[in-house]
Image (cartoon, rainbow, N blue to C red):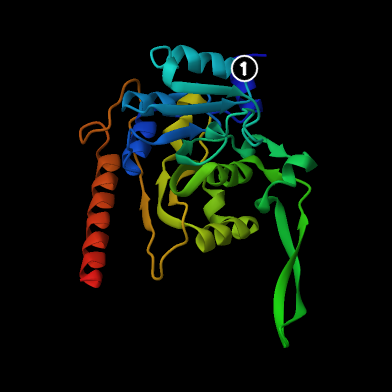
Amino acid sequence: MPQSNRQKRLGQFWTPPVIAEFMLELVGFNPLWKVIDPACGEGIFLLKALERGCKFAVGIDIDPEAIERAKTLLKDHLGKVQFYCQDGLLPINDENAFWRSDYDLVVGNPPFAATGYRVRDREILSKFELAKVKVGEETINLSGQGSLFEVSLERKRQKPSQAIEVLFLERFVNLCKQGGKVCIILPEGIFANTSLRHVREWLIKNFTIHAVIGLPRDTFKAVGTTAKTAILYLEKRPPQENHEVFLAEVSRVNVNGNASLDSDANPQLVAVLEAMKLREQTIAKRQNLAGG
């Protein structure tokens, strides 16, 4: 099968290096972090993390050819990276619990269902909250220590299929440790489609969303898609009261060749990073004043 057809069948669209750099800058990358890309493809996120001094990196991909390309790309860092050729939605196949979960940063660009790649395996779907839909609610009366109180329970059913990027979003979060960070590229539909409202509600209720940054359609044009995408950056902790999300739309990026993350080649990406930094400084000042 030609490589382009294989990539489309698997929902693979490699990420331009400058976008990977941008996402690591966005989260304030720390070389002491344990990092994983659960759908690593050729390994660009891992490479950029390792070039920044990362000591513990993991890449997972279902495609053995992609794993081999990643090993070639990361040939100078193989002592610091673990690879698993398996379905990234499944538990990591390693007896060492260190590699199975609790990552400081989960980052990547998972497959998109826009290519027709939906998950229908009932066993896999059963492991994901986002593969279920609410069908009702019931109230149960409980008694204890002489008192009676009510508990409301949601009734849910498993969907027959789910978009693969929705399941990968949940998988990214599950791999992350409490207080850790997730930075993921997702199709715009996650943030807009009515049918995916339950995904947005799940995100808003359970996690601190720092930023949603829209990317232009030509970001991945060179690798075969003009899908509208956005970067989601969150922390795995409940949101504080009155938490605000940083929203930005990038209309132009330079992803050609070795395009760099600087104000000459990519002024809009740099402007977003500067705005995020200013926002974080402002929030820190407010917290200091409140604490003082």
Is residue 14 visible in the rendered structure shown here? Answer: no
Task: Identify which amino acid the numbered label 1 is placed on.
Answer: Pro
Q: Residue at x 79, y 48 (%)?
A: 160
- Please tell me whether residue 287 is drawn above or below residue 127 in the rendered image: below
| Image quadrant in which you'd find residue 195 | bottom right
Is residue 158 visible in the rendered structure shown here? Answer: yes
Q: Secondary structure at mark 1?
A: helix
Q: Quadrant of the N terminus?
A: top right
Residue at the spot of label 1? 64
Q: Residue furthest front?
A: 145
Q: Residues within 10 Å of mark 1 (few under 14, many from 20)?
A: some
Rendered location of residue 146, percent (x, y): 73, 88
Rendered location of residue 226, percent (x, y): 50, 35
- Please tell me whether residue 279 is drawn above or below residue 79 in the rendered image: below
66 sits left or right of 20 in the view: right
Q: Residue at x 76, y 70 (%)?
A: 136
The residue nearer to you, when weighing 159 against 216, is 159
Q: Residue at x 54, y 32 (%)?
A: 99
Rendered location of residue 210, percent (x, y): 39, 54
